[in-house]
Image (cartoon, coloured by chain):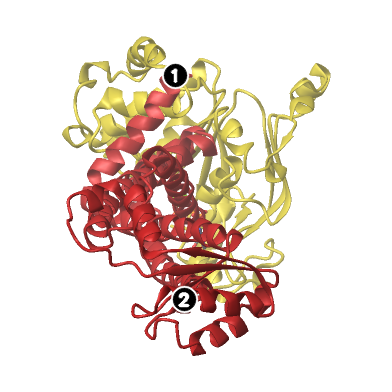
Amino acid sequence: MLDQLEFLLTEALVSLRRNKWMTFAAVTTAAMALFIIGGLTSAYIGLASYAAQVESKFEMKVFVRDEATPDQAKALGERLKKLDGIKAVTFQSKKEVWETFKKENPGITAALEIDNPMPDTFTLTFTKLSKADDIAAAAKKMPEVAPKDGVQYQSEVQEFLDQTMSTIRWVGLVLGGLMLITGGILIYNTVRLTMIARRREIRIMELVGATRQTVWTPLLVEGLVQGVLGAILATGVLWVAHSILASLVRFSIPAASMSNFALGGTLFWLILAGAVYGVGCSYLAIREPKVKEIPR
Amino acid sequence: MPWREIAPPIMQTLAPYITFDHVEVAYNDFVSGLRGVSFQIEKGEFVFLCGQTGSGKSTIIKVLSGQVKPTKGRVMIESQDVGALAKDEIPFLRRKMGIVPQDFGLLPNKKVWENVGYAMRAVGKSRTDVRQEVPDILERVNILHRADAYPTELSGGEQQRVAIARALINDPPLLLADEPTGNLDPEHSVEITDLLLSLHARGTTVIVATHDMAVVERVGHRILRMSAGRIDNRTPEEIAADEQADHNGGIEPNDEPSSSSEPSVTDSEEGTDA
Ligand SMILES: Nc1ncnc2c1ncn2[C@@H]1O[C@H](COP(=O)(O)OP(=O)(O)OP(=O)(O)O)[C@@H](O)[C@H]1O
Ligand SMILES: [Mg+2]
């Protein structure tokens, strides 16, 4: 049993070595496909969970114009409360907002000795989400509200997320699909090449009564190895890309943070995908009509 | 198909070893390999398949080994219907026969013993089996002294012996050899024929496709003469007479009932009978 396994694996290994450049091309393309698909999938998953979070605590921020007096601010609060569909209005002064922000982001603000850039802020929650648009429009018209971006309307964030996510979906589908097809053709070709290179061996195997599994296994293993190598490569590249992206984000958008890279999970899923993909491609190659036999 | 294996022993002794029952093989709409062949071979026989090029000798071997399915008729080996075997069963059919292809089919990058060992590994034998059995098998075909040579370093006759050695790995009761002396000079032909005869003497049923009449005459065993996909039952005298008639004006022999309905291509092939 073990002995037989060793025979089959040796056969596969010999072929992989013989086709090493073809294997290289197939592995890199498979890696690219898996990188694109894996990267976009994890971005998509990240955004989707963020979007869900946002929705669950849907709220609107109304920033008070800098020049407004406390009385004016108070009056604004009263008027906001009277708008249809409002559940609650809470007020945070400039100072409170700034303190909260400093508490939440100690690393960034500790070093900076700057003036408080935050405005007085009302946080609105809703009884009816569908009223959000009307309320935003009404709030924007009020004179005490900051003229530029005075209403931070989370459904805009939502919309932006939705758009980004559908873009990712499309880019992922098209780019990943193209790469998958290219990589598939390459793996298919490698296996076909092997079948041509090994047609003598395959013929002898069949002649002496080797089972189909014996003839097929090395070819399937060859596809499998290519798919899995591609997956490992893709995971590595993803990891590097993630850490570069994460440090970029950290430097440019202080408040934002990216989730950590799930190395184990990514590796697992990509290897699984790569294995299925590689075996699938070589299965297609094997099922094709026989390579022409050497004339007898 | 286990039930076939445990068929009553009385059946096995009564039924011939190999039966061709009106076997036809159509390679495609225009090309026939066999056009209705019936014969029986008993266990332990030595049979020559003779005939012109294209007469269907290789096709018979391919049908027997499950490489080609009969379009019509039935092929039985013991009580197994070869034409009805599923794809998965054919490897096990082949383990009960040794097949020697016309071109030897040796792997050029493997040594003699590796060629035999590789085939053994392919049918699931272990490395220990290979170590133990390969020398015996090579000894049986008298090539053990060249075990470490590569096929290109061997003479044609020696290569043929390696191919026969490889056919023996499953210790088969049946040996199918397609033109085993086709590429050999007379001296090596004798050597290979003697080897096949010695295997026959040990109880193996041997079927040899050949157009080497010198070998056939020397051995003098049963001959199945093929002609355009049929068994040709004429005696050598009749054939000679027909040929004479051919040369004298191309008159078709009367005892070939359907020859006029065959495509003219095969008819003209018959005309060139040597
Ligand atoms: N794979 C194939 N596809 C189509 N036609 C074939 C095939 N193999 C054989 N034939 C045809 O079937 C007929 C019988 O061929 P076969 O190989 O059995 O002849 P043969 O007696 O072995 O000849 P030879 O002495 O040249 O080996 C020939 O007309 C041949 O052209
Ligand atoms: Mg032939």
Q: Which mark is residue A166?
A: none
The residue that disc 2 covers is A71
Residue B93 point in image, percent of width and height: 61, 33
> Quick one: SS at disc 2?
helix
- Between the C-alphas of marks 1 and 2, the distance is 85 Å
Secondary structure of residue under mark 1: helix
Please, which chain is the residue tagged with disc 1 on? A
Chain B display color = yellow
Taking depth in this image into account, of B92 and B17 the one nearest to the observer is: B92
Between residues B206 and A120, which one lies in front from this camera angle?
A120
Is B128 rendered above or below residue B204?
above
Q: Which residue is mark 1?
A: A2
Q: Nearer the viewer, residue A88 or B83?
A: A88
In the rendering, at what x and y percent does residue A35 appear?
A: 34, 56
Q: Is residue B190 visible?
A: no
Check disc 1 and give the amino acid type. Answer: Leu
Q: Quadrant of residue A114?
A: bottom left
| First reached walking from the N terminus: tag 1 or tag 2 | 1
Q: Is residue B44 left or right of B107 when viewed as pictured?
A: right
Tell me the red chain. A
The x and y percentages for residue A161 are 47, 70
